[in-house]
Image: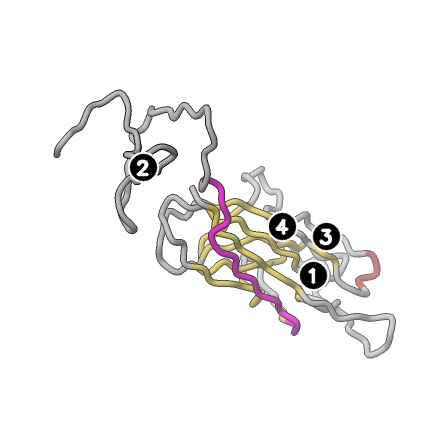
Amino acid sequence: MSEVKTNKVSPVGANGTVTLGDSGDTITVPSGVTFANSGTATGFGKVLQVVSAVKTNTSSYGGTTFSTTGLEVTITPSATSSKIFIIATPNIGAHMDNNSGCCFLRDSTELNVANAASARSLWASNAQYQYNSYNTESHPMTYLDSPSSTSAITYKVAYKMAIINNSSYPYIYLNRGIYDTDNGNYSRSSSTITVMEIAG
């Protein structure tokens, strides 16, 4: 490996540009290196791409481990240094006696779930206690992920019930309440997920 040592690199002409490498190259900055910037640096933290999905139909689930709601989106990062910012607003319906909530999945890996705390239920969104259980509750979630990958990644909103206290209503729903009676007191919702690739 060749090594060049110098105190300054300047462009050929006044107000010119110095280019490091070509498209597709990787410039490695070793651990412990500090960039001292007294000018203007650009590119870092820039949004490189945005992918979004909306789910307007319903889904249901009766398990106590996380399962996808069907609200999901796939993104292919352009660099391993990129971060992925995830925003989702799932609308969840469950009986008020049953303990339920949501998290993100990266493919099948759970993200943004609370640390274990004895026998307590764990998720990213707050567990819900929906009084009268007529309609849905919004469970907004955000998370900044560092997948270190340039392969296609599917981010999903997952849900589960931790405890089913009322076995007459053993399901959790996306975009509808548990009763779903056909009149104006009961409603349907849509849910969205958006992911943004942020330059590292």
> In front: 185, or 8?
8
Amino acid on which the number 3 mark rests in the picture: Gln
Q: CA distance from mark 3 to mark 4?
A: 14 Å
Q: CA distance from mark 4 to mark 2?
A: 41 Å
Query: Does the magenta run of residues contain 53?
Result: yes
User: Along the polypeptide, which appears first: circle 1 or circle 4?
Assistant: 1
Vertical relation: 36 (above or below) 138: above
Query: Does the magenta run of residues contain 56?
Result: yes
* Label 1 sits on residue: 91
Question: Foreground mark, 1 or 2?
Answer: 2
Question: Foreground mark, 3 or 4?
Answer: 4
Q: Which quadrant of the figure contains the C terminus?
A: top left
On the image, the x and y values in percent for residue 97 come to 75, 57
Taking the spot 52% from the left edge, 57% from the top edge, the residue there is 50
Residue 168 seen by the camera: no
Task: Please provide the residue range marked out in magenta.
Answer: 44-58
Residue 164 seen by the camera: yes
Secondary element at tag 2: loop
User: Along the polypeptide, which appears first: circle 3 or circle 2?
Assistant: 2
**Residues at marks 3 and 4 touching, judged by CB atoms closer than 8 Å:** no
On the image, the x and y values in percent for residue 24 come to 28, 51
Q: CA distance from mark 1 to mark 4?
A: 11 Å
Q: Which mark is residue 128?
A: 3
Q: CA distance from mark 3 to mark 1?
A: 12 Å
**Residues at marks 4 and 2 touching, judged by CB atoms closer than 8 Å:** no
